[in-house]
Amino acid sequence: MATKYIIVTGGVTSSLGKGIICASLGKLLEARGLSVTIQKLDPYINVDPGTMNPYEHGEVFVTDDGAETDLDLGHYERFLGVNTSQKNNVTTGRIYYDVINKEREGAYLGKTVQVVPHITDEIKSRVTALGETGEYDIIIVEVGGTVGDIEGLPYIEAMRQLRFDVGKKNTLSIHLTLVPYLKAAGELKTKPTQHSVKTIYEIGLQPDILVCRAEVPLEAGIRKKIAQFCNVDVEDVIASIDAESIYEVPLLMLDEGLDRRVIEKLDLDCTDVPELSKWEAFVKAVKYPKKQLRIGLIGKYVEHHDAYISIAESLIHAGAMNDAKVNISWIQSDEITPENVDKKLDGLHGILVAPGFGSRGIRGKITSVTYARTRRIPFFGICLGMQCAVIEFAREVCGMKKANSTEFDADTPYPVIDVMEDQRERLETGGTMRLGRFDCRLTKGTRSRKAYGKETISERHRHRYELNNTLRDKLAECGLIMAGVNPERDLVEIIEIQDHPWFVGVQFHPELKSKVTEPQPLFVDFVKASLDQVRHPETAKKIL
Ligand code: GLN
C-alpha cells in the first residue's frame, strides 16, 4: 500500500484542538493495525520553539534525537505510543534557514529563489521524506495556524501541490472548524464554517471531511446545511463535542465515524474493528477514579498550564495506574517564602518542583524542598527541581551554607550545580544544551531502580547545568544517594535521600516519555507514595 497523507487544517479560530483531533484519528487508525505518524507544520519564523517563552508557546517538547519541538508532538506520542523525531516538526524558520543556506551554497544554479516553488518544494520534501522512510502507512500532516493567515499560505499551497504530486487517491483533506452556539439566538451558527471553507477553497485545497467543534450536539438539519454549503456529504460532517478529558476524543470520533470515513475514502486495507480495549480501560480509570489525592506543582509559569502539559498528562497516566484522580494545585514559586510555606503547601499529598530556567522563583522552590524533606512529604524534583533539591541538601544537611548553582550565583563557594568542563567547550561552539535521549544506569537498592525494574534506562534531557562531579563525594558523604548515573559521561542523573517516604530528583525530563499505554514508572511510583499520605496523613506531618 502506498503511503497515504492526511492533511489537517484549521479554520475560524485557533485553539480548536487540532493536535488532539490528529492524535485521536491517528490512534483510531493505529488501533486498526495501520502504522501511523503525525507531522506538525508550524508557520512561525523561529527555527524551533526552544527560543520562545513558555508563556508564549507552552512547553517545549524534546524528542529522543534532541529536537526541541511543538507541544503537539507530546500529544502524538502519548496517544500513539510511538516516538517522534526532528522530522515530525517543520517550522517556517527551519524551511527558510535551509533554503537560504542552499542558495548560499549555489544549489539553485543562478535561479531567482522564490516562495513558489522553492519554499513550497522544501515544505513538500519534508512531508514526503517521512513517507519515504517506508515505515508508515499513514502520515497525518497537521498544518499549524488558521486558514486565512498570511504566514500559512505557503503551507496550504504546498499541500495543494502534494495532492497533485502523490495522487488524489493517496491524500485526504480534513478541515477542523468551529460551529458556535449563540445563546441569545438559541442556535448553532454555520456561517463561520462556510466562510472558512470558502477561504480554503480559494487557495485550492478542498476539504473532504469537516470536523466541527461545538459545545452542543449537531442536529441532522445543521449537518445537512453544513454539507450543502461546504460541498461535502452529510456523513462527512463530523461533530466534535467538548469532552471532559482529551483521552475521550478518540472514542467520540469513533462514534462519529471519522475513522470509517477516512478508511473508505483512502481505501485503506485494515481490520474492521479497532483494538481499543486498553484505551477504553484507561479512559474508564480516568473518568471514574476510586481515590483522589492532591499534588502541588511548583513552578514559575503555573498561570499557563500548557507550560507544564507533559507533567500534567503524566500525572493523569500515573493516576489511572493507581486508580486515582490526581488533583493538581498550581503553585507560583515566586510567592513561596519560609514564612508562608506552611500555609501555601498545606494539605498536599505530594510535591513536585518543576523544571525551569533563570533565577525567578528559586527561593520558593528551595523553600518547598525543605518543607517536603523535613515534613516527609513525597517529593519529585524534575530538572531544575532536582537541582534545587541538591542545593537545599548541600545548604541544610551538608552545612555548605552558600551552596548554589552557577546559573544563579557565579561566585558561590559551593557550586554544587555547575556547567561541566566538556560542556563548557560545547558552549563555546554554540551547542549549549544537553538535549535528547541519554542512558542512565540505576544504582542497586534505590527507589528508582525498584520503580523502573531494570538497570539501564534512557530518558530525555534539556538543560545546561549538572550536579558538580567535584562536589559529588562530599554530598554523598552527607547521605545524598546518586541513584542514577550516565555511564558515558559519568553525570549524575538521579538523586534520592534515605529515611524519607519518597524523595527523588531527576536531571532528565521523565514527563516526556509517559504514554497512555506505558505510564512513566517514576510518576507511577510518586503517585503511589503520595496516595500513602492520604492513608497515613500523620506521616506527612511528622517533623524530622
Ligand atoms: N536551568 C537548568 C539548566 O539549564 C534546568 C533546566 C530545566 O529545568 N530544563 O540546567
Image (tube, rainbow, N blue to C red):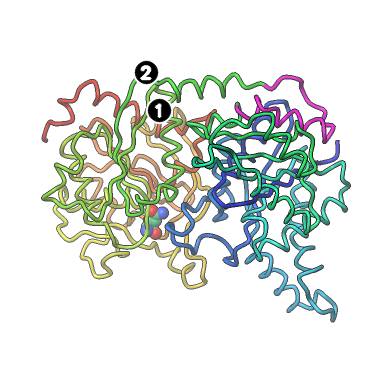
533, 289: nearer the viewer: 289
Towards the viewer: 189 or 281: 189
Query: On residue 290, which mark appears?
Result: 2
Q: How many numbered marks are there?
A: 2
In this rendering, the label closer to the viewer, 2 or 1: 2
Q: Which residue is at 60% across, 44% downward? A: 178
The vertical placement of 73 against 502, above or below, is below
Mark 2 secondary-structure assignment: loop
Three-letter code, disc 1: Gly
Q: Quick check: 485 above or below 35?
A: below
Circle 2: residue type: Lys
- Residue found 61% across the figure and 30% down from its top: 250
Q: Position of residue 215 (x, y in %)?
A: 53, 36
Q: Are marks 2 and 1 in contact (CB under 8 Å)?
A: no
Q: In terms of sequence position, does the residue under pointer 2 or pointer 1 come before the other?
A: 2
Q: Magenta segment, which residues?
A: 252-274
Residue 528 is drawn in which quadrant? top left
Residue 319 circle label: 1
Q: Is residue 185 visible?
A: yes
